[in-house]
Amino acid sequence: MRPARSSAIALGLVAVLALTACSDDDTDPVTDPAASGSTAPSPSAPDDAMSGDVTFTATEYGFDGPDTLPAGKVTITLVNEGEEPHEMALFPVEEGRGPEDILEFIENDPELNSPPPPWVIGEGMGTFAKPGKTADPVSAKLEPGTYLAVCFVSTKQSDGTPHAALGMISEITVG
């Protein structure tokens, strides 16, 4: 599979799972993988890669966490201290791209029905936590570059507006 295609599939999967998993509170961890915490499997990373463990805290409508991460294997835990469900989709973007590009993407497709934009590159990862819960940690090998952490969840409280459009986007440098 080509890298650009796999990143599109990974990001699309994270967004679709988050949107469908968060639409109702009666999820079953057996039939709904998002109900247990993580919305994406942990991509494998070599044991000899530089590693780092990091926690991000989600609230309405932002992430609290580092703005830099080490390249190599990174394990992320998402703690949801908010009153709404939140996800953190973390994906690499082309040099010069940032939060404003995600906002434009959402403005052009508020239902998030289109595939990820072509400036999303490489592999991404994602995790999801219900209000007051901590998601299972997810790990991935991150290459150096610019990444965006985005919550694509939309809720009834915000008239279906994705949390990213309300400011839940962080730019992270991996290096």
Image (spheres, rainbow, N blue to C red):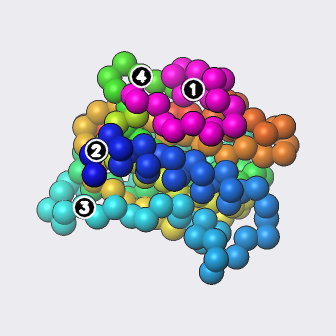
Residue sticking out furthest to the left: 48
Discs 3/1, front: 1
Pick whichever, 60 or 23, lies toward us. Answer: 23
Q: Residues within 10 Å of mark 4 (few under 14, many from 20)?
A: some
Three-letter code, disc 3: Ala
Mark 3: few/some/many CA within 10 Å (<14, 14-19, 20+): some
Residue 169 seen anywhere in this rendered image of the structure: yes
User: In the structure shown, which secondary structural element does the residue marked by tag 2 occupy?
Assistant: helix
Report the amino acid beneath label 4. Arg
Amino acid type for the residue under numbered disc 2: Pro
Q: Tell whether position 9 is magenta.
A: no
| Amino acid type shown at disc 1 | Phe
Q: Mark 3 points at which residue?
A: 45
Task: Look at mark 2 in the image and give the residue it sits on.
Answer: 3
Q: Between disc 2 and disc 1, whose residue precedes?
A: 2
Magenta span includes 104: yes
Lower position in the chain sequence, tag 4 or tag 3: 3
Precedes in sequence: disc 2 or disc 3: 2
Question: Quick one: label 4 or label 2, which is nearer the N terminus?
Answer: 2
Whole-angstrom CA distance, mark 4 to mark 1, is 12 Å
Quadrant in which residue 46 is drawn? bottom left
The reply to whether callout 3 and callout 1 are in contact (CB within 8 Å) is no
Q: Using a 10 Å C-alpha cutoff, classify the residue at mark 2 as few (fewer than 14 neighbours), some (14 to 19) or many (20 or more).
A: few
Spatial CA span between label 4 and label 3: 26 Å
Q: Mark 1 points at which residue?
A: 105
Identify the secondary structure beneath mark 3. loop
Q: Is mark 1 on a helix, strand or loop?
A: helix
Q: Where is residue 122 in the image (x, y as percent from the top left)?
A: 31, 42
Residue 80 in view, yes or no: no
- Which residues are drawn in magenta? 100-119
Coordinates of residue 114 in the picture (x, y in percent): 57, 36
